[in-house]
Amino acid sequence: MIDSSRIGCAIYVPGMSSYTLEPFVVDDKWFLHHLTTENLFIPFVLPDGWKDTWDEDPTSLSGDTASFDEAVMLANCISYDHEVPTVVQPFADGRAPSYDAVGFPRKWIDPGKSYAEALITASEAAVDVRFTDCLRFRYSDDSLNEFGGRFQGKAEPLAMYGMALRQVDLLAEYLCLYRICEWADGVNGKKFINNNVDAIAGHDFGELWLEHLTLERERPKRNVFEEYQERAVGRLEALRTGGEEDIGKYLYGFRNGLAHGKSDLLVQDFGASVDRVAQELPLLRLLCRLAIAG
C-alpha cells in the first residue's frame, strides 16, 4: 500500500478521456502514478538504477514524491502538451491557503484544500469553454516524456502558458499569452511575432486528438492543433487582405488595450470586445507554442 502520509501533492488534469489516462515516466526521474478513480497523478521519485530493479509497482518505491515546485513544473509541461489547465493540489491537510477568505472559521474544511478545489472547478470550466468533448492523453508516445530535453530553460513561458489556460475570461487569456511573445524577444513581442508568424502555416504542431463521445464503434475525432492552425492561417490571410501588414504591431495593440488604463481600452463588455480578441487567440496561441518549442 502507498504511504499517503509521505505524499506532498498531486497533479489534477481535467478534460481527458478516462480510458486513455495511464501512468508514465518522465526523464527517468519521475513516475507519475495515476489514481484511477480521479484525474490525479502523484509524482513519485524514481531511484537510481530503477530500470533494473523496479517492477512498475508504485508501492515498491521509496514513497518520496516531487517537491511542490517540481510538481508545478511537471504540471505546466502536461498543460502545454494537452492544452488544458492543471492544478497542483496538496495531498495532505495543513497547507496554508493562497487566498485568505473573509468570514468565519469553518473547522470542518481544510482551507488549503478548499482553495485547490476552487481552482479545480475553475479549470474544468476553462476546459468546457475550449472543447466540446474529451482529449486523448498523449504520453503513450515516449518521445514526449523527455521534459528535461524538450523544456530546458523554458520554465517561465511554460508557467505563463499554464496560467493562460486557466483563464475562462478570454481577455485575461490573451494578456497571459502575449507575455510569452514578450519573453521570446525580451522587449515587447512585436519583433518575435513578425519574424515567426509566417512559420505557422508550415509547422508541424503534433497531434492532440479530441474524441467525440458517441456510441459509434469508430468515434469521430479531430486534431486540435490542426484546427488551431487552420483558424490561425485563415485569420492571418484575412488580416493581410484587409491591409494589415505589421501583425506584431496589430496584436500588440490588443495587449496595450488590455494591460493599460490610459487610452483605447479593452474591457469585458460581454460582446464586441470579447469577439475581437477571441478571433486573434488561435494565431497568438500558436505563436506562443513556437516560442516555447523553439
Image: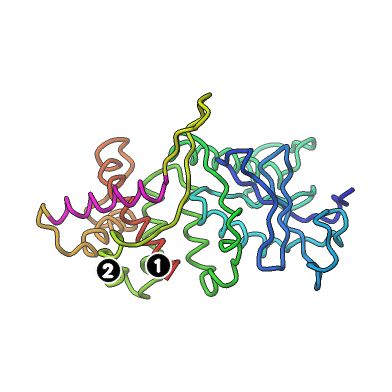
Residue occupying image coordinates x 39% and y 71%:
184
Which of discs 1 and 2 lies nearer the camera? The answer is: 1
Camera-nearest residue between 122 and 228: 228
Looking at the rendering, the stretch of residues picked out in magenta corresponds to 223-240
Q: Are marks 1 and 2 in contact (CB under 8 Å)?
A: no
Q: Considering the numbered disc 1 on the image, is that residue within a helix, a strand or a loop?
A: helix
Provide residue 287's location: percent of width, then percent of height.
35, 61
Residue occupying image coordinates x 27% and y 68%:
190
- In this view, the residue farthest toward the front is 217
Q: Which mark is residue 245?
A: none
Amino acid type of the residue tagged 1 in the rendering: Ala
Q: Magenta stretch: residue 72 in it?
A: no
Camera-nearest residue between 196 and 115: 196
97 up-or-down from 289: above or below: above
Question: Alpha carbon of mark 1 to alpha carbon of mark 2: how far?
Answer: 13 Å
Q: Is residue 69 visible?
A: no
User: Considering the image in quadrants, where does the C terminus appear?
Assistant: bottom left
Residue under label 2, please give it: 190
Provide residue 239's location: percent of width, then percent of height.
17, 53
Q: Magenta stretch: residue 236 in it?
A: yes
Horizontal side, residue 238 vs residue 283: left or right: left
Badge count: 2
How packed mark 1 is, by other alpha carbons closer than 10 Å (few <14, some 14-19, many 20 or more), is: many
Amino acid type of the residue tagged 2 in the rendering: Lys
Horizontal side, residue 98 vs residue 124: left or right: right
Residue occupying image coordinates x 21% and y 55%:
236
Provide residue 276's location: percent of width, then percent of height.
25, 45
- In this view, the residue farthest toward the top is 215
Q: Is residue 161 visible?
A: yes
Residue under label 1, please give it: 291
What secondary structure do most residues of the magenta stretch adopt? Answer: helix
The image quarter containing residue 247 is bottom left
